[in-house]
Amino acid sequence: MLLAVDVGNTNILFALCEGERILHRWRIATHAERTADEYGVWLHQLMAMHGVERAQVSRAIIASVVPQTLFNLRGLARRYFAVEPLVAGAPGFAWGLPIRLPNPGEVGADRLVNAVAAHAEHAGPLVIIDFGTATTFDVVAADGGYEGGVIAPGINLSMDALYRAAARLPRIAVEPPPEGKGAIGKGTVHAMQSGVFWGYVGLVEGLVARIAGELAATPAVIATGGLAPLFARHTAVIDAVDPDLTIKGLIRLEAANRGQAA
């Protein structure tokens, strides 16, 4: 059984996988100071609740955009599962795709993992939109090469900044204005819903159009991240939603790099 760990800026996703099947998914808030023992106790309790023994985990892979977490996550794999984890992007790690950037090391591991998974499942040039702490757009060529992308502030990050900086604006949920109400706000909450939600729909549609223009092709657009289903319902530019895209990529990369951890 494979333990796949996806470390984001806000949450860490732990997934237990058998072959290409994702059996269990558990999330915990990202705290760089969390120790291997804290991870171990928390994860062991969740596994026990689902009848999974620690000895069933024989492999591990980690993708992290928070480098400070790696020491303790490696410790978790070694101490509690007796395995040496693969780390996406570590020296010698094989991505299996060309990275067409002047400095490939600048690209977040999660973005390349997503590119691997999306190219394996979708044909043609692709744009992958990840609605996370940041909203990222990653461009994958028809041959699987990573061409680059766009990084924008995540919608929750933008909303939090607006709430904190403007004394009279309330904190609101991420949702479109109520049905029947247009883009022109008739009150503060309505105006904020319109600006935040439709503003991000415009961001998505505008950037996809610009990327398509630069590619001189119409890419398939794949969305992932917690808010992907919500936005996919309100724009025609998103062709598919895959909440498990990163874990699928980690499964593929672990299989391709198996043996290198040793």
Image (cartoon, grey):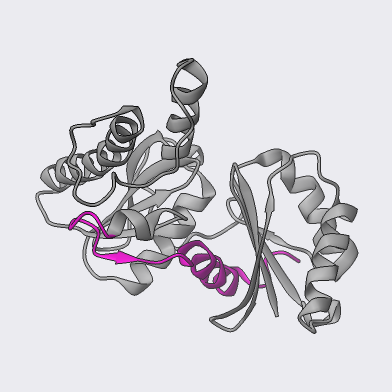
**Vertical position of residue 202 compared to residue 98: above or below:** above
Residue at position x 45%, y 16% in the image: 166
In the rendered image, residue 98, in percent from the top left (x then y), is placed at 38, 54
Residue at position x 47%, y 55% in the image: 226
In the rendered image, residue 64, in percent from the top left (x then y), is placed at 62, 49
In the rendered image, residue 234, in percent from the top left (x then y), is placed at 24, 55
**Vertical position of residue 194 compared to residue 117: above or below:** above
Using the rendered view, name the quadrant where residue 207 is placed: top left
Using the rendered view, name the quadrant where residue 52 is placed: bottom right
User: Is 78 displayed left or right of 27 in the figure?
Assistant: right
Quadrant containing the N terminus in the rendered view:
bottom right
**Vertical position of residue 110 compared to residue 122: above or below:** above
Quadrant containing the C terminus in the rendered view:
bottom right
Do we see residue 91 in this rendering? no
Using the rendered view, name the quadrant where residue 169 is placed: top left
User: Is 1 displayed left or right of 185 in the figure?
Assistant: right
User: Is 255 displayed left or right of 221 in the figure?
Assistant: right
On whether residue 169 falls in the magenta region, the answer is: no
On whether residue 259 falls in the magenta region, the answer is: yes
**Residues shaded magenta:** 233-262
Residue at position x 34%, y 31% in the image: 192
